[in-house]
Amino acid sequence: MKQKRLEAIISKVLGDNTKRNDEIIVRCPYCNHRKHKLSINLLNYKWHCWVCNVKGVGLQKLFKKGGGSYQDIQDANLVTGKPTNEKVVVEKQIALPYEFQPIATGNPRDPEFRNAAMYLKRRGLTKIDILRHNIGYCSTGSYKGYIIIPSYDGEGNLNYYVGRSYYKSDFPHKNPTASKNVIGFDMLIDWEEDINICEGAFDAFGIGENTIPIFGKFMPKKLKAKLIEKRPSRVNVILDRDATEAALDVSQHLLDNNIDAYLVQVPEGSDPGDLGVDKMKQLIDYAEPLNLMKIMEMKFEL
């Protein structure tokens, strides 16, 4: 009865919604995304927007942001109890560097453009890779001399980017101070096909289509949730040899949720970006499915 009452109050304040088990999914009053992207747990009153990543506990501040009246808030408090230590966390929205210039529309007379384009060619990227991923560069500003590889979520919104120097540098990587709890290249992923998981963006280019970089060695919570939701028939875990333990942890999480996991091991001293799509396809084709016993044996050998 209390839950039904709370559902009615949420509908009144935040508008039409979708019910899923013990959660209500509504439009986010912080980012005003056109789709239902903010989930409210009806049991613990935690809420989180999967687009702008704002989150909190307790409904008072959420209702205020959504235009709720004093009476709406009081009605909700009668159901949830008076809020204590209510908090809201709003993460900074990410944006590409101001000087970002897509390679596709770069000026051939610009030396920075030529150097950036030559670097990508040496790394084995094709024109299709560059166009599909909107890869760019910066010829001025703090990212001068860096290739910029954007990542977009399933709605086409920027969720992360990586910078890689196309000159010899003591600081070859330059990434934003933003959350890595994202699904890399989500906009380009077909969740009904086999999925590849790797560490970095250039690894993803070396592996080929339907590859998700995790921008590190640990699988983001958003990706874990999406994999469980979409349940692909097969997930190939392709991390560097020095991240074997992390790769096994990822594989075990998949198996625990009844998703077939394959550990694809790259030869020592190599990475997918060096090997290229053809060689990586061979390694993927010859990979064997994991089981919990095999994972335990491999962990003992580390």
Image (cartoon, rainbow, N blue to C red):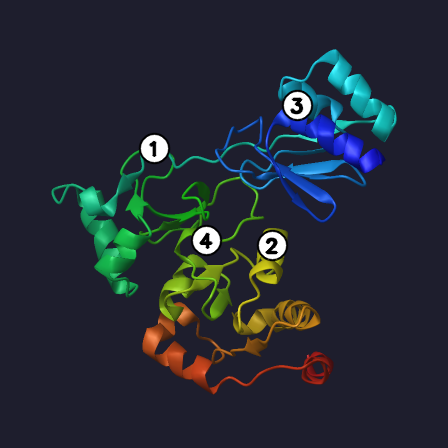
SS for callout 1: loop
* x and y, in percent, of residue 231 in the image: 57, 66
Q: Quadrant of residue 7?
A: top right
SS for callout 4: helix
The residue lying furthest to the top in this view is 70
Q: Quadrant of residue 36?
A: top right
Which image quarter holds the N terminus?
A: top right
Residue type at numbered disc 2: Pro
Question: Which badge, 4 or 1, comes first in the chain's sequence?
Answer: 1
Residue under label 2: 220
Query: Relative to residue 152, is residue 2 depicted above or below?
Result: above
Question: How far is the residue under mark 4 from the one under mark 1?
Answer: 28 Å
Foreground mark, 4 or 3?
Answer: 3
Foreground mark, 1 or 3?
Answer: 3
Question: Which badge, 1 or 3, comes first in the chain's sequence?
Answer: 3
Q: Residues within 10 Å of mark 1 (few under 14, many from 20)?
A: few
Residue 186, label in figure: 4
* x and y, in percent, of residue 79 in the image: 85, 28
Question: Does residue 170 appear to the left or right of 91 in the view shown?
Answer: left
SS for callout 3: helix
Q: Nearer the viewer, residue 178 or 171?
A: 178
SS for callout 2: loop
Residue under label 1: 141
Residue under label 3: 13
| Residue at x-position 62% and y-position 61% | 228
Question: Does residue 17 appear to the left or right of 128 in the view shown?
Answer: right
Question: Which badge, 4 or 3, comes first in the chain's sequence?
Answer: 3
Q: Are marks 1 and 3 in contact (CB under 8 Å)?
A: no
Q: Residues within 10 Å of mark 3 (few under 14, many from 20)?
A: some
* x and y, in percent, of residue 141 in the image: 34, 33
